[in-house]
Amino acid sequence: MHPMDSTLQQSFPTVMVPRFGDLAPMEGAGERLLAAEDGMFLEVSRPWLRLVRQIGKYHVKTAVPYGLVAETTYLRCGKVPVHLIGAFAEMARATMPNETGAWVVWNAVTRDFRLAPVIIRSQGRGHLDYSRPELSADEVLVLDCHSHGAHPAYFSSQDDIDDVHDVKFAFVIGNCGADVPSLALRLCAKGIFEESERVPSDWYAATKAGRGV
Ligand SMILES: [Zn+2]
């Protein structure tokens, strides 16, 4: 085998889902393809997350001697503290009418979350250009937050381009001058986008004007 293929395949292996035994979850960080009875699944593992999603079905009803695997979302980090959502809402309000951004990061050793403002290169009423915040070796991105100033919260085509390779939650806060801003939240995982129909209600409570930090 070509050494480059050997390296590629080790970095992103395909695993046959057992029919009679259990599939052992990935231990470290990485990705695998899972060949199951009913199609192909992507497994993504990060210090803070384990995710399994179906990414393809077979076109032909042929017998595939593999087992089934369930779509899974397991947050190893637990819930994002809602006071950090409130803190970002305050940042977004203070930056009105311009856009701003910050990351909620999680330390896999101490298990603490913190809000890390992004390093802004340029910002305006309809754009934000930034570099990633400096993180310690144990910190990982969990929630990528940005604001839309006076505009409503939604995921733009530019957001889709920005988010396509990442594994994270993405959060937008819009109508930042309103007492109750608009919110949008989605899971991004290697091209999979799953927008939440309902942002958690305590996030709405935390982002209301006058809540303080
Ligand atoms: Zn946006």
Image (cartoon, rainbow, N blue to C red):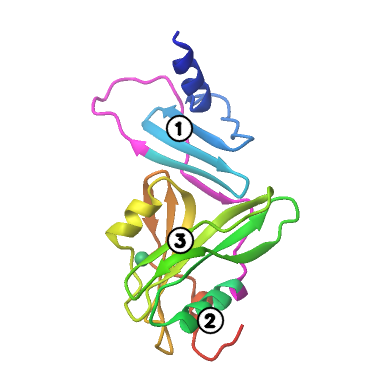
* Residue 62 is one of the magenta-drawn residues: yes
Most foreground residue, 61 or 179: 179
* Quarter of image, res 146: bottom left
Which residue does the numbered mark 1 point to in the structure image?
Answer: 68
Tell me which residue sits at (49%, 53%) in the image: 168
Q: CA distance from mark 2 to mark 3?
A: 19 Å
Tell which circle, 2 or 3, labels the residue nearer the N-terminal end: 2
Q: Nearer the viewer, mark 2 or mark 3?
A: 3
Tell me whether the residue at label 1 lies in contact with that at label 2, contact meaning CB atoms closer than 8 angstroms.
no
**Image location (x, y in percent) of residue 3:** 48, 12
* Quarter of image, res 178: bottom left
Q: Which residues are magenta?
A: 55-83
Residue 90: assigned label: 2
Ligand 1 quadrant?
A: bottom left
Which residue does the numbered mark 3 point to in the structure image?
Answer: 130
Q: Nearer the viewer, mark 1 or mark 2?
A: 2
Q: CA distance from mark 3 to mark 1?
A: 42 Å
Tell which circle, 3 or 1, labels the residue nearer the N-terminal end: 1
Amino acid type shown at disc 2: Glu
Tell which circle, 1 or 2, labels the residue nearer the N-terminal end: 1
**Image location (x, y in percent) of residue 191:** 37, 45
Asked if residue 120 is positioned above or below residue 83 in the image, the reply reads above
Q: CA distance from mark 1 to mark 2?
A: 45 Å
- Crowding around mark 1 (Cα neighbors within 10 Å: few <14, some 14 to 19, many 20+) is some
Tell me which residue sits at (68%, 52%) in the image: 136
Q: Pick out the residue farthest to the right.
A: 110
Tell me which residue sits at (59%, 87%) in the image: 212
Query: Could you tell me which secondary element the residue under label 1 belongs to?
Result: loop
